Image (spheres, rainbow, N blue to C red):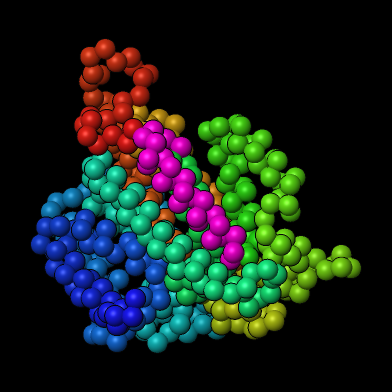
C-alpha cells in the first residue's frame, strides 16, 4: 500500500509472542496456542524475529509457556497411547545418536553446536506442540475455533505462495518457476504442507451443512489445490490423488468416478506447464530423468547402509553428515531415512505411531455423533494419508513448518474422540434414537 507500515509487522508480531507468553502463564494458554498457529508454517516471518532478543526461539518459548500455563490450570491430556509412543520414540532417537557417536558417524549430541543434537531438538518441537494442544483444547467450542484458525493459517500460506508463483511466467516449466513460499525450505516441502491441508478441509467440509460455510470450505480447498499445482511437485500430486481416492472409499463412492475421469483426461485439464513437469519423470529415450535417477541411486546406496546395521541403524541424524550420491544430504524418502538411521527398531516404532494416528482419525470419523467431530476425524485421516505419500519422496515429517499444524490437529482429534465417548456415555435426549447422531448440545454452536 506504500504506507511503510509493513516494516513494523515483524516487530508487532514479535511483541505479540511476548504478550501471549504472559497470557498463557496467567490463565489463558489456549490464546497462546491460537496465536502461534499461523506462524508455525510461516517461517519467513519468524526468521525476521531474529533481529530481536530471543527472536529465534520465540515459537519454542511460547509452546513451553502454553504447556506450563495449562498445567498450572490443572488441565489434562486426552487419553491416548500416542503420547507414550512419542516419548519412547524421542528417547530412542536420542540414544540412537549416541550409537552414531560410538560408530564415529557423528559428534556427541550434547551441545547446540552439534548438528545432530540440534536436529533432534528441532524435531522434538512436534510432540511438544501436540502436548500443548492436547492440554489446552478441552471443549467443542475450542475445537471449532481451532479449525477456523487452521483455515486462516492455510489461507495465508496459499496467498503468499500463489502470489509468488503467479509473479513468474507459468506457460512452460523449468526449475526457476518453482517457489518456496513462506515455509522457506523448498517447493516440495511447501507442496507437502498444502496437499495435507487441502485434504483436511476436503474431508472436514464434507460434514458441514450450512451452505455458506460449506462453500467457503470448498473454496479454500480449491485455492489450496491450485496453489499446490503450481509448486510443480509430482509427489504432492500423487498425495492428493491417493487421499482423494481414500475419501471416495470412505465417504462418497461417486468421487471415485470423478477421480477416474480426471486421471483419463488430466492432460487436457491442467496447464501445459504442469503436464510438462509430470512428463519429465522420463526422458525421450524412456530413461529416468536426472533427479529421479539420482534418487534411485541414493536409495540403492541407502540399502547398503541399512544392511550394514539393520537392527539399530547408523544413528539418528547421521545421514546428513556423510557423503552420498550427488552430494545429497537426505535420503529423499523418510521411510528409508528411518531405517538407515534408526534400524528396524526405529522403523517399528514409526509404524506403530502412524497406525495410531490413522486409527485416531478413523475412530472419531466412524463413531462420532457430532458432525464437527466427524469432520475433524475424516479430515485428519486424509491429511495423514497425504503425509504418508509425500514422505515417499523426501523427509516431509520432521519439519515443524510442514507438520506442526498436523500435530495440533492430532491433539484435536484425540480430544474429539474423548468428547465423542462422553456423548455416548451420557443420557439420550428425549425422542432421540440410539443410533441417531447428536448434532450438538448447544444449538448456537452448530455448523449446520
Position of 301 compared to 138: left or right? Answer: right
Q: Is residue 230 magenta?
A: yes
Task: Residue 369: give x, y in percent of width and height.
Answer: 35, 28
Identify the image quadrant of the C terminus: top left
Q: Is residue 232 visible?
A: yes
Looking at the picture, tell me which residue is in the foreground, 302 or 294: 294
Q: Residue furthest front?
A: 2
The image quadrant that residue 28 belongs to is bottom left
Identify the residue at image location x=56%, y=79%.
320
Q: Is residue 262 left or right of residue 388?
A: right
| Residue 38 locus on image (x, y percent) | 34, 63
Q: Is residue 438 above or below residue 60?
A: above
Residue 280 sits inside the magenta stretch: no
Give the quadrant of the N terminus: bottom left
Q: Residue at x 39, y 69 (%)?
A: 42
Quarter of the view holding residue 294: bottom right
User: Which span is picked out in magenta?
Assistant: 206-231
Q: Main secondary structure of the magenta part?
A: helix
Residue extending furthest left? Answer: 26
Question: x, y percentage for residue 395?
Answer: 55, 66
Amino acid at each position: 500500500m506504500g504506507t511503510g507500515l509493513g516494516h513494523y509487522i515483524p516487530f508487532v508480531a514479535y511483541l505479540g509472542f511476548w504478550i501471549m507468553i504472559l497470557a498463557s502463564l496467567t490463565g489463558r494458554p489456549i490464546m497462546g496456542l491460537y496465536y502461534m498457529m499461523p506462524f508455525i508454517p510461516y517461517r519467513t516471518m519468524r526468521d525476521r524475529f531474529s533481529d530481536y532478543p530471543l527472536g529465534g526461539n520465540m515459537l519454542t518459548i511460547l509452546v513451553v509457556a502454553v504447556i506450563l500455563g495449562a498445567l498450572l490450570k490443572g488441565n489434562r491430556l486426552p487419553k491416548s497411547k500416542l503420547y507414550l509412543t512419542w516419548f519412547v520414540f524421542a528417547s530412542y532417537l536420542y540414544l540412537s545418536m549416541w550409537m552414531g557417536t560410538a560408530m564415529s558417524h557423528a559428534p556427541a549430541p550434547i551441545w547446540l553446536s552439534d548438528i545432530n543434537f540440534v536436529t533432534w531438538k528441532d524435531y522434538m518441537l512436534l510432540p511438544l506442540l501436540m502436548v500443548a494442544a492436547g492440554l489446552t483444547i478441552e471443549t467443542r467450542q475450542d475445537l471449532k475455533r481451532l479449525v477456523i484458525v487452521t483455515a486462516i493459517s492455510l489461507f495465508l500460506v496459499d496467498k503468499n505462495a500463489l502470489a509468488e508463483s503467479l509473479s513468474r511466467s507459468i506457460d512452460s516449466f523449468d526449475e526457476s518457476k518453482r517457489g518456496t513460499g513462506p515455509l522457506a525450505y523448498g517447493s516440495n516441502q511447501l507442496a507437502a504442507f498444502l496437499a495435507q491441508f487441502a485434504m483436511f478441509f476436503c474431508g472436514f467440509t464434507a460434514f458441514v451443512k450450512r451452505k455458506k460455510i460449506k462453500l467457503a470450505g470448498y473454496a479454500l480447498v480449491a485455492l489450496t489445490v491450485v496453489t499446490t499445482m503450481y509448486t510443480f511437485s509430482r509427489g504432492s500430486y500423487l498425495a492428493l490423488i491417493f487421499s482423494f481416492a481414500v475419501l471416495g472409499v470412505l465417504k462418497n463412492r461417486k468421487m471415485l468416478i470423478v477421480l477416474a475421469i480426471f486421471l483419463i483426461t488430466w492432460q487436457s485439464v491442467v496447464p501445459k506447464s504442469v503436464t510438462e513437469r509430470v512428463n519429465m519423470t522420463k526422458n525421450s529415450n524412456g530413461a529416468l530423468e536426472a533427479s529421479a535417477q539420482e534418487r534411485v541411486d541414493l536409495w540403492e546406496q541407502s540399502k547398503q547402509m541399512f544392511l550394514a546395521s539393520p537392527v539399530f541403524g547408523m544413528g539418528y541424524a547421521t545421514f546428513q553428515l556423510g557423503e552420498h550420491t550427488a552430494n545429497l544430504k537426505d535420503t529423499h524418502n523418510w521411510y528409508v531415512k528411518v531405517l538407515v538411521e534408526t534400524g528396524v527398531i526405529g522403523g517399528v516404532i514409526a509404524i506403530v505411531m502412524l497406525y495410531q494416528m490413522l486409527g485416531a482419525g478413523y475412530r472419531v470419523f466412524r463413531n462420532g455423533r457430532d458432525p464437527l467431530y466427524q469432520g475433524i476425524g475424516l479430515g485428519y485421516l486424509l491429511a495423514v494419508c497425504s503425509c504418508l505419500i509425500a514422505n515417499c519422496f523426501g523427509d516431509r515429517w520432521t519439519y515443524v513448518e510442514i507438520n506442526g499444524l498436523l500435530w495440533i490437529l492430532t491433539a484435536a482429534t484425540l480430544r474429539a474422540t474423548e468428547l465423542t465417548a462422553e456423548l455416548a456415555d451420557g443420557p439420550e435426549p428425549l425422542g432421540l434414537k440410539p443410533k441417531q447422531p447428536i448434532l450438538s448440545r448447544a444449538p448456537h454452536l452448530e455448523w449446520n
